Image (cartoon, rainbow, N blue to C red):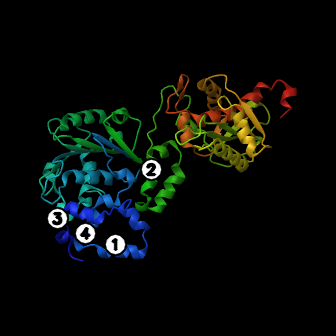
């Protein structure tokens, strides 16, 4: 093939229209799913210029979380796990801002701030890294690094200036129409640096900025996410698995999956500690059971049915818990075995899910809250299996009051999680004595509370009455 630098299309829009065909969901998706013959025909149909352009048309290859959202936003936050493709998304966004149709044509932005934790990290990751701006740029639009000025300069005159988050005052004075901020959540002077950037982001009709970061529970990131002018995209590490070593994924998943660190660094989830919460992820992690489980005296499947069953309804909480209840109650232990929660399209669907969970775990009883559904809950379950051991429970106190004695069991070391249940654990860590601080209803937590009440609270209340205790 000829030298790509000589045959690269001068018109960026022309190259894109040639490569991005209307029938494609995305170019990479289409090409990956095409037959070998279709792939060969596609590549043979391209001109030399289009073929040379193909690696640099990011819209063709981008994953959904790497594509800028539509709308009149000011800040785009790309949150993701390690290796999720955040740096590539940031580099490509800068390209889309500064590049014009031709190599010498102006783009939307001409003055860009590049900010990392240190100047060295900014240069080595954002500028020269494998997914950095230079590596992503086509030959005829590739910027030059001017080391003495810490600048990238494009053929069309656009300039990107490198800054360090250790020196917020360095942003006092310069002005920009675009900015790329990398790993803001780990900066020691994050708030001061962010504030200085906002004062300088004032050129053009609508200056914008992209923030690529692994999430951490820091105030400046939470404030940015809460701003109405902010949009977000998100992806776990595995979203980018095609470009990651298989051994890396296996190793980190085996070691960190479901843990506090794994939820943050691999799943890219912002773990927001709620003040006064009854549980913390660290305490749940500390009591997690990774080894062999004991033989259980009882196994309960608890259900918190959703009031309605449709696409937008609350989830139906379904949680499985086993318990060892021999000897004195102080020695009893419970183990959360599965979170089988579903968002059901009908009552029959969640009932079937609950009964399947009973079969999987050889459960002794199904417990269901009936405050909302009443006899309907029992009727739905027994219409599928009339012989199922079933108990209806009715709440007489609020959710937080019901959760408090269960939280006490955890504090006493009597409850362990035999696995990682991220969504359930998130709900637990948002329940406070004053109520639930999360979105929607804590359906998973409600089901957990009912299961542990059935196994660990109610039997203890009857411990001093042998005639009741022997009923089993």
> In the orientation shown, which residue stands out farthest toward the right?
467
Judged by depth in the image, the label closer to the viewer, 3 or 2, is 3
Residue situated in front as seen by the camera: 260 or 291: 260
Quadrant for the N terminus in the image = bottom left
Of label 3 and label 1, which has the lower sequence position?
3
Residue occupied by mark 3: 10
Please give the name of the residue rendered at 43% of the width and 73% of the height, measured from the top-left corner: 35
355 or 83, which lies in front? 355
- Mark 3 or 1, closer to the camera: 1
Give the Cα distance between marks 4 and 2: 32 Å
Is residue 293 placed above or below 46 in the rendered structure? Answer: above
Where in the figure is residue 126, as x and y percent of width and height? Answer: 27, 52
**Would you name the residue on which mark 2 appears?**
236
Question: Does residue 432 appear left or right of residue 301 in this picture?
Answer: left
Comes first in the chain, label 4 or label 1: 1
Q: Do the residues labelled 3 and 4 touch (CB within 8 Å)?
A: no
Whether residue 243 is visible to the viewer of this picture, yes or no, is yes
How busy is the neighbourhood of tag 2: few (under 14 within 10 Å), some, or many (20 plus)?
Answer: many
Q: Is any atom of residue 337 visible in this view?
A: no
Q: Secondary structure under badge 4?
A: helix
Task: For mark 3, give the secondary structure.
Answer: loop
Nearest to viewer (mark 1 / mark 2): 1
The tag earlier along the polypeptide, 1 or 2, is 1
């Amino acid at each position: 093939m000829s030298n790509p630098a000589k045959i690269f299309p001068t018109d960026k829009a022309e190259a894109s229209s040639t490569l991005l065909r209307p029938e494609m969901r995305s170019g990479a998706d289409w090409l990956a799913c095409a037959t070998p013959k279709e792939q060969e025909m596609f590549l043979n149909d391209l001109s030399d210029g289009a073929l040379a352009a193909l690696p640099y048309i990011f819209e063709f290859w981008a994953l959904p979380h790497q594509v800028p959202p539509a709308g009149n936003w000011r800040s785009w936050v790309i949150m993701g796990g390690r290796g999720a493709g955040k740096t590539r998304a940031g580099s490509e966004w800068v390209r889309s801002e500064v590049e014009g149709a031709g190599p010498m044509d102006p783009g939307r932005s001409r003055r860009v701030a590049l900010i990392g934790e240190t100047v060295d990290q900014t240069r080595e990751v954002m500028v020269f890294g494998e997914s950095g701006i230079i590596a992503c740029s086509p030959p005829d639009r590739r910027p030059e690094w001017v080391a003495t000025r810490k600048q990238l300069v494009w053929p069309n005159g656009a300039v990107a200036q490198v800054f360090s988050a250790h020196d917020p005052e360095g942003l006092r004075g310069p002005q920009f129409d675009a900015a790329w901020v990398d790993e803001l959540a780990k900066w020691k002077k994050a708030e001061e640096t962010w504030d200085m950037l906002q004062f300088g982001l004032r050129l053009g009709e609508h200056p914008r900025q992209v923030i690529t970061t692994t999430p951490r529970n820091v105030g400046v990131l939470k404030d940015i996410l809460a701003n109405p002018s902010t949009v977000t995209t998100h992806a776990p590490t595995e979203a980018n698995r095609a470009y990651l070593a298989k051994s890396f994924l296996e190793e980190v998943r085996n070691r960190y999956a479901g843990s506090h660190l794994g939820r943050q660094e691999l799943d890219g989830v912002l773990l927001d500690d709620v003040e006064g919460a009854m549980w913390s992820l660290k305490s749940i992690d500390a009591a997690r059971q990774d080894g062999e489980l004991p033989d259980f005296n009882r196994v309960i499947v608890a259900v918190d049915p959703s009031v309605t069953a449709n696409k937008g309804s609350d989830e139906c909480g379904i949680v499985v818990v086993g318990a060892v209840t021999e000897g004195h109650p102080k020695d009893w232990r419970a183990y959360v075995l599965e979170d089988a929660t579903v968002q059901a399209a009908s009552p029959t669907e969640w009932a079937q899910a609950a009964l399947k969970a009973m079969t999987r775990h050889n459960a002794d009883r199904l417990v269901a809250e009936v405050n909302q559904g009443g006899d309907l809950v029992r009727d739905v379950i027994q219409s599928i299996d009339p012989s199922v051991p079933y108990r209806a429970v009715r709440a007489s106190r609020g959710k937080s009051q019901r959760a408090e004695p269960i939280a006490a069991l955890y504090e006493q070391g009597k409850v362990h999680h035999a696995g990682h249940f991220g969504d359930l654990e998130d709900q637990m860590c948002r329940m406070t004595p004053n109520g639930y601080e999360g979105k929607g209803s804590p359906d998973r937590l409600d089901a957990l509370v009912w299961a542990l009440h059935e196994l660990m609270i109610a039997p203890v209340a009857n411990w001093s009455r042998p005639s009741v205790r022997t009923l089993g």
